[in-house]
Image: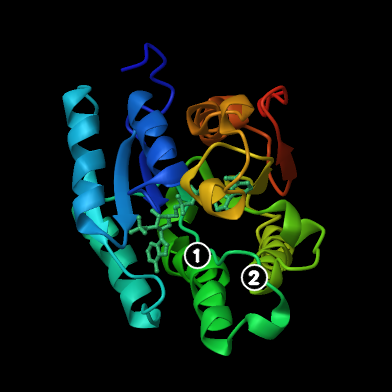
Amino acid sequence: MENNQSLKDRVILVTGAGQGLGRAAALACAGRGATVILLGRTTRKLEQVYDEIVAANGPMPAIFPMDLEKAADKDFDTLAQTVGYQLRRLDGILHGAAEFESPSPLGQQTAEEWQRLYKVNVIAPFAINRACLQLLAAAPDAPVILVGESHGHVPAAYWGGFAVSKAALEAYFRIQAEEWADAANLRLNLVIPGPVNSPQRAISHPGEDKSRLPSLATLATDLADLMGPEGHGRRGQLIEWHPASSMNT
Ligand SMILES: NC(=O)c1ccc[n+]([C@@H]2O[C@H](COP(=O)([O-])OP(=O)(O)OC[C@H]3O[C@@H](n4cnc5c(N)ncnc54)[C@H](OP(=O)(O)O)[C@@H]3O)[C@@H](O)[C@H]2O)c1
């Protein structure tokens, strides 16, 4: 565990916590003393992250298996009720879950793929934030981090439904940030990582030399900063992340 306990006593929900960025962010937040709620599709992976946190003497996490593609309003409400009932508070959310399809021409993409991308990448973050709003509003400081993608910011050929879903996430971010503008504790930010050595990157850029890419742990450390006191005052910002960019300045 880190000496930095800046997230001590905070409860933070991390989606997609079983692997990739979500896993790295969950470990980073737990390392700073947060009780993390590990939400994801594959229970086995969540249990592994749980074990890693406990083995590192982190606060005992909670596991919440959930398939965001299949979830409906009542499931998101159940999530918020369970967090409220069992943990009594929620101090932040990091939306790490993401659906991805390998780049291809639009002519080869299907409506089913687009629906899956839209449900996991756009509807789920919106619906989780909506369901958890009462808990977040009660927290002294409630950072919420959305994870965008450069092709959602600047769409390009072959990025298809994935880029469209991330562009929609960006639109949602702007609307939600404006609606939360009067609540200083609701700190919504959208982080767009540049290239990072992650499982998704292995699929999107299979031939690339990954050894020079920044690690997920580096990105996760900056996200944990943004989650804590170092991130105070940062809200409504679209943050284009690269390793040299300190997010807490
Ligand atoms: N890598 C890069 O270079 C890069 C650059 C810019 C932005 N990003 C963004 O960073 C984010 C994370 O990327 P990553 O590489 O960490 O992705 P990843 O390794 O593919 O992880 C995605 C996570 O989302 C979960 N997930 C997917 N569908 C789900 C569903 N229906 N219900 C619940 N959970 C679901 C997965 O669960 P399972 O483990 O159960 O499948 C997995 O834990 C993405 O938004 C990506 O666009 C990455």
Label 2 element class: helix
The tag on residue 165 is 2
Label 1 element class: loop
User: Residue at 64% across / 46% down in the picture?
Assistant: 184
Q: What is the quadrant of the N terminus in the image?
A: top left
The tag on residue 99 is 1
Identify whether 32 is placed above or below 130.
Answer: above
The amino acid type of the residue labelled 2 equals Ser
Q: Among all residues in the image, which is located at the extreme bottom?
A: 111
State yes or no: Cβ of the residue under disc 1 lies below 8 Å from any atom of ligand 1: yes
Closest to the observer, 87 or 35: 35
Question: Residue 160 placed where, x, y %?
Answer: 70, 72
Question: Residue 147 placed where, x, y %?
Answer: 59, 51
Q: Are marks 1 and 2 in contact (CB under 8 Å)?
A: yes
Identify whether 95 is placed above or below 159.
Answer: above
Question: Residue 201 placed where, x, y %?
Answer: 56, 47
